[in-house]
Amino acid sequence: MELQNQVAQAVHVLNHDAQSCNRVSANQWLVQFQQTDAAWEIATSILTSDHHKQYLSDFEVEFFAAQVLKRKIQNEAHCLQLEAKESLVNALLVAAKKFSLGPPQLLTQICLALSTLILHAVDYNKPIEKLFYSLQNLRGQNDGNIAVLEMLRVLPEVVEDECATYNIKSGQRADYGPELLSHTSSVLEFLLQQSNESFDGVIQSHDRTRKILRCLLSWIRAGCFSEMLPGSLLSHPLLNFVFNSVQNLSSFDLAIEVLIELVSRHEVCIRVAFSFTWSMVDFLFTFLQGLPQVLLLKVGFLKDVLLRAFTTRDEKVISGLACLMSEIGQAAPSLITEARPEALVLVDALLSCVSFPSQDWDIADSTLQFWCSLASNIVRMEEEMTENSKHVKDVFSPVFLALLDALLMRSQVDDSTYGETAARDLPDGLAQFRLNLVELLVDICQLLKPAVFLQKIFFGGWLSSNAQIPWKEVETRMSALNVVADVVLQEGQTFDLSMVLHLVTILCDRASYEPKGFMCIVHRSLADVIGSYSKWISSYVTNARPLLLFIAAGMSEPLCSHACATAFRKLCEDSTTVMHNPASLEMLMWIGEGLEKKHLPLEDEEDVIGAATLVLGYLPNTELRNNLLLKLLSPSFESIRKLIDRDHVLSLRQQPAAYTHLVNSSVRGFYRIGTIFGHLVTPLSTCPDIDNSIIAILETFWPMLEKFFQSDLIENSSLSMSACRALSQAIKSSGHHFVPLLPKILDYLSTNFTSFQTHECYIKTACIVIEEFGNKEEYGNLFVSTLERFTHASSVMAINSSYVCDQEPDLVEAYCSFTSVFLCSCSKEVVASCGPLVEVSLQKAAICCTAMHRGAALAAMSYMSCFLEFGVSSLVESVTCNADTSVPLMVVQVISHSGEGIVSNVVYALLGVSAMSRVHKSATILQQLAALCSFSEKTKWKSVLCWDSLHGWLHSAVRSIPGEYLRQGEAESMGPVWIKALADAAFDYVESRRSDGDKTHKHMRGKGGRMLKSLFRHFVDSHRNIGT
């Protein structure tokens, strides 16, 4: 008794003491108490006796006791003797009866504990039958039926709980489902009896109804009606009880949930039906078609309830009925398309739900999947030209026209968003509703055809110049028009969109028009339409000035700047000739030069600058083109010029805000310069003198860039990154102009990286340089010197563990990409001359392939594979073509020194967290390495590198794996199996190289290569959880 009192006191302290230290101590004591054997007896006593009443507070002690028993049953019930289990079952039955009218959460915990205990009792041949026998005794007692209802409710949930861990005999758990359903008739009879019992005053009638519905719902989920024919289900008294409960507000939500569950069970059965034999399918589909039909017969009743809810504006009831009727319609769309009276009643009811002006969009949103299903079904029937398809379309086209009207009305912004000072963007609920609406609008457009859809969009007098334009309606219709753009354009027919231009003109005719408040949303929707239909619009636009004015106005507002930038890009792409009009060019230049003040996101600014460059690049007059390009860049050049002016910057640094603004402007300036270089390549085919324009820009750009690279401004990572990007784009567009500057460029890049080794952008730019000019052998020493500087940089030399690699993944990716490009772009003689550097880089890559960072690891493995491919190619050439031996000698020496590290790290990579993503590259690397060792056997370098070398490396790698990562005896068996697989893979690789030369990569194509990859995949899959 003393321990029982201590438990009650500890629970009271845990829940009510004001001192946190006391609550922590009580919690620790209770946790320790739960782990003791005494907890069984104390918890049982608390639930069955009344000695602790002085500590009672909202039944919290009993609730704790029930939770303790449930946890201990789940974890330790298998340790109890049969007598102890029988005693505990009886005690829990007593507790269930005792608290049948008590807190529902407490009764639920007791019933969960009892159900779990019965299922854990392996001593019982049929545990569920044992439980039902016990419940028969409980039913005969006062208020026992309430406890039985709760027990029957939780039992199917416990049985179906896939996450529970049962300590039972293998295979017994599989019998619980059929055993449970074998009691279906008695459970339904009991529920029917309870539904017919008169109100006795002990428990409220609506509470009894809710308990019955919860229990029925649980058994429906378990499949209690799975074998009942639709006719029997329709006439079953319990179904009438459920429909009657729909009319009662206190039980409405549960009754709807029961009916929706019935429908969803039908949908699950449809998916399962296809796995049965044909004889079973015939029966199933007879049943499956019947269930929705049964519920359709009740639609008239449901609509009456819905109409009463419309009158009282009861959104809870409307929402529930909308969900139910949508589920019924989706369960069997073929029944809806038959257009029977009850189906049309359902469609009309759901249309009314969409039109209902609720406070949010949940009711309309709940019907969208039904409408999508119906529209898709009708479109499919029309495409397949099925019988009756024309009649079906004729019947439902007016419905979808009315639906489109309703959706356009419901997707309008509310009054709180409309106005000059209102919230800037759409409410979250409306934004999500419109997102969910996309699929349905596309389906409606396909069903009605674009001509009818567009006619509906532009229907009405809202564009009359004599009327006040309803901008809320305009915004909604433009949003819908943008959504269906792909369908409309695929139709191939051109439609008149002059009304869109009329709206643009109306807005731009306003004095000093600036989109504010809700007009920003209108502006965005119009800009989206202009971008989506730019090809059509450009076909009949002769003066682009109004459009450009409209776009420029929107770029100043963050809410619509992206839409305007995209529209500007698409217009420039689709109407280059119109843009060459002097007035349009003037507007285009005004937009480009004004970007400095608009502060667009970089991706939007790139759209604008790139589009303007495209238009200017096609100008036939070279002098005009050059002048306009330089004018477009003048704000960028001006910012950079000020930044590299030492005297100006020294004075400006006394004003932090002004200096930061200048730095940001210069960053954007470099980005714009790079964007222009990138887009000037496009018109080369039609403008043979485009090179002249590139030179004109370079003459201004290069001196400033050179001065920047020599300044201390390179410390700023954003400036360095943007400058390197501009240089990279310039080299890609006009590489031949930079040949004389290569020594300077590579010196700047390597020196600046050495000074600021967190700026990997310098390595990335050097990678572009080597890729562009690596074939120029006269600069071979320069390329080797650059590789040496990067390799000997302290940050690269510090990469001596996977941990370091995970700390600097961007550096690893940049360095590995550079070394890969160096191998592929430079001449073999140049590569052969830097063997020690290649060896160091290969060792670093081998270390990085075990990193957790996937990108860095795969970049390292790509470089390793690249080098091994280079090595095999060199060896094959030296033997078959009597080529220079300096290259294969370097390869053999590097592999002989680094092979053990390569094999060891690749094996470890197959044991890492994301090992499965590295299987292919690991197999490729080891296949190439095996091919090198195998082929070297036939050369004069056999004493340096041979097959035994690989055998020894693999043996060493396997021995070094910690024991906890391998199964018992696996280390001894791995070596021979892997060596055999590597030998087969190497043979395939060498043979493919002999027959095809250097045309294609042949690794993984032979049977041996594929078997090696399969072996590695199986190894990774079987070692996922070992060592964790």
Image (tube, grey):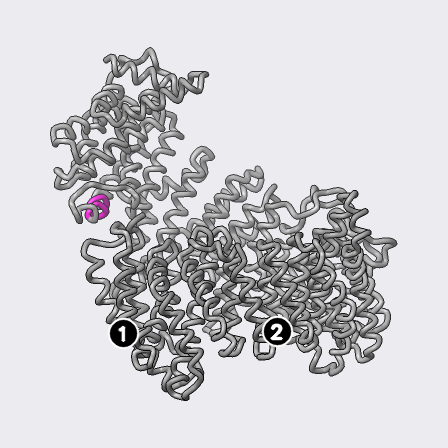
Between 326 and 662, the one lying in front of the other is: 662
Residue at image x 22%, y 41%? Answer: 166
Q: How many marks?
A: 2
Q: Which residues are magenta?
A: 175-181
Q: Disc 1 residue type?
A: Ala
Instruction: In the rendered view, tell whether residue 469 sits above or below residue 418.
Output: below
Amino acid type, label 2 = Glu
Q: Is residue 625 magenta?
A: no
Question: Where is residue 713, by image quadrant?
Answer: bottom right
Residue visible at 50% across and 44% down in the picture = 304
Res 80 quadrant in image: top left
Image coords of residue 157 (percent x, y): 30, 41
Name the residue carrying label 1.
983
Task: Estimate the spatial distance between the alpha carbons at disc 1 and disc 2, rounded to whole Å.
Answer: 58 Å
Mark 1 secondary-structure assignment: helix
Judge whether 81 appears above or below 9 on screen.
below
Q: Can the viewer see residue 311?
A: yes
Furthest-bottom residue in this view? 881
Quarter where residue 975 is shown: bottom left
Where is residue 474 shown, x and y percent of the image? 72, 56
Q: Closest to the observer: 189 or 707?
A: 707
Residue at the image point whose x is 14% and y is 28% from the top: 84
Residue for badge 2: 491
Label disc, if present, on residue 620 of the rendered structure = none
Choose the circle earlier in sequence order: 1 or 2: 2
